[in-house]
Amino acid sequence: MRAVRFHGQGEPLVVDEVEEPRPGPGHVLIDVAAAGVCGTELHFLDGLLTPASTPLTLGHEVAGVVAETGAEVEGVAVGDRVAVHYLHACHRCRWCLAGDDHLCDAPLGFLAFVTDGGFADRIVVPASAVVPVPEGLDLSVAAVLCCSATTALHAVDVSGVRPGDSAVVYGTGGVGLAMVQVLREAGARPIAVARNPERLALARELGAVATVDASKEDVAVQIRQVTDGAGADVVFELVGTRETGAAALAALGKRGTLVYVGYSFDTVEITPLSLVVPEQRIVTSVGNRRSELVAALDLAARGRLRTTVVEYPLEEAGTALEDLRAGRVLGRAALLPGGVSAR
């Protein structure tokens, strides 16, 4: 079968012919209908992240149709339309038992980080990692929700945001646009910050009460203006550069919370006194729980979470990543192998 393989930093992605995987006990074989293209893949190409081994098939956002089940599989059948939770939790360690399976101590697999991902015709995963896709929801949409919307849901939960809070979404890529909608559902007042006018317009359409063009305006000043001088209750930092981190801190109000989701090679300098006096805090949010994938698919199926999917054939993975890096993808990109329908 075909698989888009990462051979190392600085090397081009290659569509290799590889042996088709077979499902062992407790596992299922999935015909991939769609695989989301995420900024994480750019981090691999740039050397910010390093996979456990190479070559490795990329793609941690996957949806498709179950083609075969291994022994001891219950609750999943051939023909089921499913999405995959990319961290395959053990469901036995203290984190899993506490409901935080995204922090699992002994995962059975980790798509495109440790185990082969979904930029391929087929993929094998533990049956416990799959989630049913609601009827009527396109598999291409389900695939891109596996990281963007779920990451947004998790970050909002970590933040402790409350109804009526002013919540800044700094960055309006796939996660940011999903977060605007999740915050709207939570009763907060989303404020979107970005440099792309089209994305800012889309953020407003999706529920942002205000937008700030970081290429033209002082972000912190504008945030204080739209919050009547109080500053933001929560800022979600989805970019992770020195510049955006400084602006995010300056935009926080008293007892405000800065939530780091994005990252880069940059470091951010913090003066403790500036945080202590207004009782501000900095927290981080990583990935998502399996339950948050269930919730994201449900929101999308009910029309409460919208996303635009730009589709590419599997062989154009490199083009999709170039378009993502250049900011040409409005919404989310997905690769379609073509073996099964993404509809």
Image (cartoon, rainbow, N blue to C red):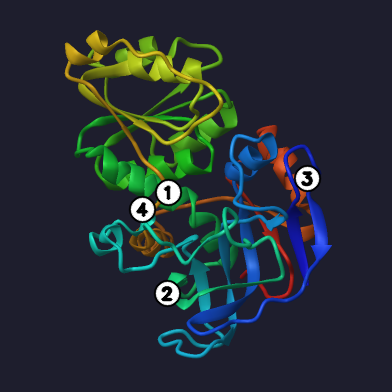
Looking at the figure, which quarter contains the N terminus? bottom right
CA distance for labels 2 and 3: 33 Å
Q: CA distance from mark 1 to mark 3?
A: 25 Å
SS at circle 1: loop
Q: Which residue carries the number 2 mark?
A: 128
* Residue type of the residue flagged with mark 4: Leu
Residue indicated by mark 1: 287
Query: In front of the other: label 2 or label 3?
Result: 2
Percent across and percent down for residue 162 are 19, 38
Label 2 with label 1: CB-CB less than 8 Å = no
For mark 4, what is the residue?
Answer: 103
User: Would you call the spot at circle 4 few (<14 residues within 10 Å), some (14-19), or many (20 or more)?
Assistant: some
In the foreground, 7 or 180: 7
Disc 4 vs disc 1: Cβ atoms closer than 8 Å?
no
Marks 4 and 2 sit apart, C-alpha to C-alpha, by 16 Å
CA–CA distance in space, label 4 to label 1: 9 Å
Is 304 left, or right, of 122 in this rendering? Answer: left
Earlier residue among tags 1 and 3: 1
Circles 3 and 4 in contact, beta carbons < 8 Å: no
**Mark 2 / mark 1, whichever is N-terminal:** 2
